[in-house]
Image (cartoon, rainbow, N blue to C red):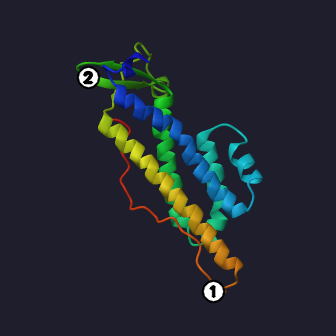
């Protein structure tokens, strides 16, 4: 990718690569929330990853997790985390289905080909409706992805601790570890 050469958008390319590659970790963390509720690995992996489609995977997990996480008092956090995960999916998709380019006066830009394909007018130029992105925005998007991962880690461990306490039948004992819920951060823009 020439636009990500060292003399152009090298640092930006590294962050874009981490956003693209890291999205799978977010989905796995979502799947772990289902695994801990189900008590087995096999069913959740088959449910969530049985067919392609990141949006479909989030909706399958949302439906499968609702009853269990509502019983544990975690429904509001679950809804928020899955909505935030969906935003990460949208960010990832715009980078997965695009044409990148760099110019000295404009910096790094991308043309979202899915967005272009949905326009009602005739497509005459790929880069006509391009969007700028800079390193600060890309880093904010990456940080937001990590925040979403932490939210899902919190949900997984909070459910596990709740389920463990329920299984003890109210008997005292050390509480299970709960990954702390991170402070809310705002969603970054999709592009500059």
Residue 174 visible in the shown view: yes
Find the residue positioned furthest to the bottom: 171
Q: Relative to 165, is 83 on the left or the right?
A: left
Q: Position of residue 181 (x, y in %)?
A: 46, 64
Q: Position of residue 120 (x, y in %)?
A: 46, 24
Q: Residue at x 61, y 55 (%)?
A: 62
Q: Position of residue 146 (x, y in %)?
A: 45, 49
Q: Residue at x 26, y 22 (%)?
A: 106
Q: Residue at x 50, y 52 (%)?
A: 149
Q: Relative to 149, is 161 on the left or the right?
A: right
Q: Secondary structure at mark 1?
A: loop
130, 157: nearer the viewer: 157
Q: Position of residue 24 (x, y in %)?
A: 57, 41
Does 169 appear above or below 53? Answer: below
Q: Residue at x 30, y 39 (%)?
A: 136
For residue 135, which quarter of the picture?
A: top left
52, 152: nearer the viewer: 152
Query: Which residue position is annotated with label 2?
Result: 106
Neighbour class for label 2 at 10 Å: few (<14), some, many (≥20)? few
Does 49 appear above or below 96? Answer: below
Which quarter of the image is occupied by the N terminus? Answer: top left
Find the residue positioned furthest to the top: 124
State which mark lies toward you, 1 or 2.
1
Does 60 appear above or below 92? Answer: below
Q: Relative to 67, is 90 on the left or the right?
A: left
Which quarter of the image is occupied by the C terminus? Answer: top left
Q: Secondary structure at mark 2?
A: loop
> Which is nearer the N-term, disc 1 or disc 2?
2
Query: Is the residue under label 2 in contact with that under label 1 (CB below 8 Å)?
Result: no
Report the disc number at residue 172: 1
């Amino acid at each position: 990718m020439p636009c990500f050469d060292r003399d152009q958008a090298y640092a930006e390319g590294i962050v874009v690569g981490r956003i693209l590659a890291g999205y799978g970790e977010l989905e796995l963390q979502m799947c772990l929330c289902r695994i801990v509720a189900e008590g087995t690995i096999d069913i959740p992996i088959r449910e969530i990853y049985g067919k392609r489609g990141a949006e479909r995977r989030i909706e399958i997990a949302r439906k499968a997790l609702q009853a269990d996480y509502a019983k544990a008092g975690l429904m509001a956090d679950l809804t928020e985390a899955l909505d935030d995960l969906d935003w990460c999916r949208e960010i990832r998709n715009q980078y997965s289905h695009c044409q990148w380019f760099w110019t000295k006066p404009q910096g790094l830009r991308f043309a979202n080909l899915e967005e272009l394909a949905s326009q009602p007018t005739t497509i005459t130029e790929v880069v006509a409706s391009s969007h700028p992105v800079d390193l600060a925005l890309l880093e904010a998007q990456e940080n937001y992805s990590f925040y979403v991962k932490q939210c899902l880690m919190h949900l997984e461990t909070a459910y596990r601790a709740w389920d463990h306490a329920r299984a003890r039948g109210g008997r005292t004992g050390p509480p299970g570890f709960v990954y702390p819920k991170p402070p809310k951060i705002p969603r970054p823009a999709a592009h500059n």
